[in-house]
Image (spheres, rainbow, N blue to C red):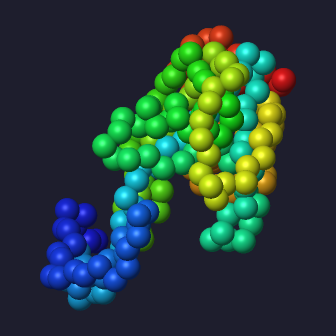
Amino acid sequence: MIDKRRKWITLSGQTVFENRWIEVKSYKTIAPTGAAADYGLVHIRNLAIGVLPIDEGGYTYLVGQERFAFDHYSWELPEGGGSRDVPPLETAKRELAEETGLSAGRWRPLLEDVHLSNSLTDERAYAFLAWDLTAGAEGERDSTEDLSIRRLHFREAVEMAVSGEISDAFSLMMLLKADYLARTGALPESLAQLLLSGG
C-alpha cells in the first residue's frame, strides 16, 4: 500500500499559455510512487462561486446557457467567477443579482473550498444558500452571456440533478448538499420545509 503522506516533488515548471482567466503550466515532477512524470496543470485565476436561491414558495432559479467546452446547452444554478481577493459572499451577491435580478436577505454557506477538478486544475469553489429573496436587484452581465432563467420548485431541480438533466457538477453538489441538510435537520425548520415540500 502506498504511504498517503508522500507528496509530489516539483523539479521544474513553465507557463505554456495564459490569459486573464487561466494559466496553463507544464511541470517535471516525481510522483508519490517515485516515478518521474510530466504534469500539466491549469491554474484558475478566480474562485468559482455558486448560489442556490430559494423563494417563499420553495422555488429556485436555474440559468440556461450554451457552454463552449461541450457544445451543450446547460441548466445550472447561478454561478460565476470572483477574484480571490474578494470575500466569496460578496461575489455570490453580485452573481445572484447579475444572473437573476434577485437579492437575498439571508445567506448560509453551502460549500466551502471544494475542488471541482483536482486532477487537472487548482480551481476552488464556494457556494451559498440564499433565501428571503427580493426582485429588482441590478447587475451587469458579461458580454458573452446569453442567459435564460427558469423558475422551478427545489424538488424538481433535485430530480433534474438525479436524472442527469442537470450535468453541471457544481450545481449537482449544491442541490444535493442542500437536500441532505434539509433532511438531516441542519437548516432552519421553515427553510427545510420549503425544500422538502412538493411545491
Residue that protrudes farthest toward the top in the picture: 190
- Residue at x-position 67% and y-position 31%: 101
Residue 74 lies in quadrant: bottom right
Instruction: Specify whether residue 93 is in view.
Output: yes
Q: Nearer the viewer, residue 29 or 143?
A: 143
Give percent across and percent down for residue 104. Answer: 59, 21
From the viewer's perspective, is 191 left or right of 196? Answer: left
Asked whether 129 or 145 is in front, the reply is 145
Residue name at image x 51 percent, y 22 percent: 107
Q: Where, by quadrant of the figure, is residue 95 drawn?
A: top right
Q: Give residue 10's position: percent from left, percent from top.
A: 18, 77
58 to the left or right of 187: right
- Regarding residue 161, the answer to whether it shows in the image is no
Task: Give the residue drawn at x 65%, y 40%.
Answer: 99
Image quarter of the C terminus:
top right
Q: Is residue 91 above or below residue 136?
A: below
Left or right of 113: which side holds 151?
right
Residue 63, percent from left and from top: 71, 45
Q: Is residue 195 above or below residue 111?
A: above
Which is nearer the eye, 92 or 142?
142
Give the tally of numbered discs. 0
The correct choice, above or below, for 163 with respect to 134 in the image is below
* Residue 97, x across and y down, in percent: 61, 32
Q: Quadrant of residue 197?
A: top right
Q: Is residue 197 left or right of residue 52?
A: right
For the point 63% across and 16% down, the residue is: 132
> Which quarter of the rendered picture does the N terminus lie within?
bottom left
